[in-house]
Structure formats: structure tokens, C-alpha cells
């Protein structure tokens, strides 16, 4: 009887890069003055969005504008190298550009603290390829609900 060893599951280069980015974000946050968290986070998020290409940048800019307009009390910050917005230190909403993991669409996600519960099943992430005015209004409503 022959026993075969299972091959170890490893992270992709993109996943390792995201984890390294998150570790650096934690170090940077720990060194900063908590009183400047919102301004520092805003600067970091805008710089990250500016690094994005084409439609990712456009979507990132629109999502940032929607979040800051509908939930100005959320604190912008980077989370695994992508724009995110937190309440009481916990991520509520986050944006992932398509290029991050070579996906065909960007993603807007809501974390558990968002509490967007709607019955027994509800979406917590949305694929974004472009945004219409109706999409922006819907996202604004979700962000406002999530930020409470």
C-alpha cells in the first residue's frame, strides 16, 4: 500500500503581496498619531486610488466620493493594500480594484460590522464594471445603512 503526500496549498504571489501590504499598514498605523487617523487614512486611500489604472481608478474615485458623502464619519484606511472605510477601527466597506487579483471586475464589499442583514440571505459584495447614476444611488443607500 502506497501513501501519497498531499501537496501543500500555498498562497499566490498576489495573495502574499496583499498580506505583506496589510502587515505594513498595521505597522504604519501603530506609528501614527491616532488624532490624525482620518487625514492620514484619506491621504493613503487617495494615493492608492491614484496608482490605479483606467476604469479601476475611475471606480475607486467614485466609490470614495460616494462613501465620504454618505458616511463622512467613516475613517478611510488601506486594508490589504486597497481602499477601505472603518467605524470604531473595524472595516465596514472596502473596494478592490480588478487589477489586484487580475479579475475582470472590481469589487465593492461590506464586512460583518456593516450589518446589512436582510432576511436569511443577503449580498455582502458586488461586482463593479461601471457605475450608473442608479448604481451610485443604491451604493450610497447601502453605505449609509452600513455606516450606522
Image (cartoon, rainbow, N blue to C red):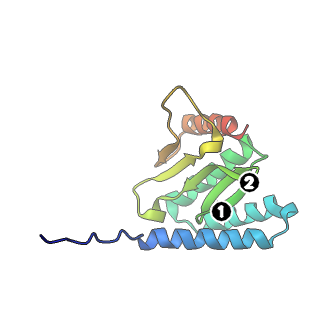
Name the residue: 55% across, 65% down.
Answer: 52
Q: Indicate left or right for 11 with 80 as reference.
A: left
Report the residue marked by disc 1: 78
Query: Looking at the figure, which quarter contains the N terminus?
Result: bottom left
Q: How far is disc 1 from disc 2 in space, using C-alphas?
A: 12 Å
Q: Nearer the viewer, residue 23 or 103?
A: 23
Name the residue: 50% across, 57% down.
Answer: 55
User: Picture quarter containing residue 145?
Assistant: top right
- Residue 111 at x, y = what percent? 59, 46
Q: Nearer the viewer, residue 106 or 65?
A: 106
Q: Secondary structure at mark 2?
A: loop
Q: Residues within 10 Å of mark 1 (few under 14, many from 20)?
A: many
Of all residues, the one furthest to the front in this rendering is 1
Name the residue: 60% across, 44% down.
Answer: 112
Question: Which of the two labelled residues, at mark 1 and mark 2, occupies the earlier sequence position?
Answer: 1
Give the answer, above or below, for where 101 lies relative to 74.
below
Name the residue: 34% across, 71% down.
Answer: 8
- Residue 47 at x, y = what percent? 67, 67
- Residue 64 at x, y = what percent? 66, 52
Report the residue marked by disc 2: 89
Q: Indicate left or right for 97 with 68 as reference.
A: left
- Residue 30 at x, y = what percent? 77, 70
Q: Indicate left or right for 129 with 37 as reference.
A: left
Q: Indicate left or right for 2 with 87 as reference.
A: left
Of all residues, the one furthest to the top in this rendering is 119
Of all residues, the one furthest to the right in this rendering is 35
Query: Looking at the figure, which quarter contains the C terminus?
Result: top right
- Which label lies toward us, 1 or 2? 2
Q: Secondary structure at mark 1?
A: strand
Of all residues, the one furthest to the left in this rendering is 1
Amino acid at each position: 500500500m502506497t501513501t501519497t503526500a498531499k501537496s501543500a496549498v500555498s498562497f499566490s504571489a498576489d495573495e502574499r503581496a496583499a498580506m505583506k501590504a496589510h502587515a505594513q499598514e498595521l505597522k504604519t498605523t501603530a506609528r501614527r498619531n491616532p488624532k490624525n487617523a482620518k487625514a492620514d487614512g484619506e491621504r493613503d486611500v487617495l494615493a492608492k486610488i491614484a496608482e490605479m489604472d483606467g476604469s479601476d481608478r475611475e471606480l475607486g474615485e467614485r466609490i470614495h466620493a460616494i462613501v465620504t458623502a454618505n458616511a463622512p464619519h467613516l475613517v478611510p484606511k488601506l486594508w490589504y493594500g486597497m481602499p477601505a472605510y472603518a467605524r470604531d477601527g473595524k472595516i465596514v466597506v472596502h473596494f478592490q480594484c480588478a487589477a489586484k487579483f487580475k479579475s475582470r471586475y472590481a469589487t465593492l464589499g461590506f464586512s460583518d460590522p456593516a450589518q446589512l442583514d436582510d432576511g436569511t440571505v443577503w449580498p455582502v459584495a458586488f461586482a463593479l464594471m461601471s457605475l450608473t447614476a442608479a448604481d451610485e444611488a443604491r451604493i450610497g443607500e447601502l453605505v449609509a445603512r452600513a455606516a450606522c
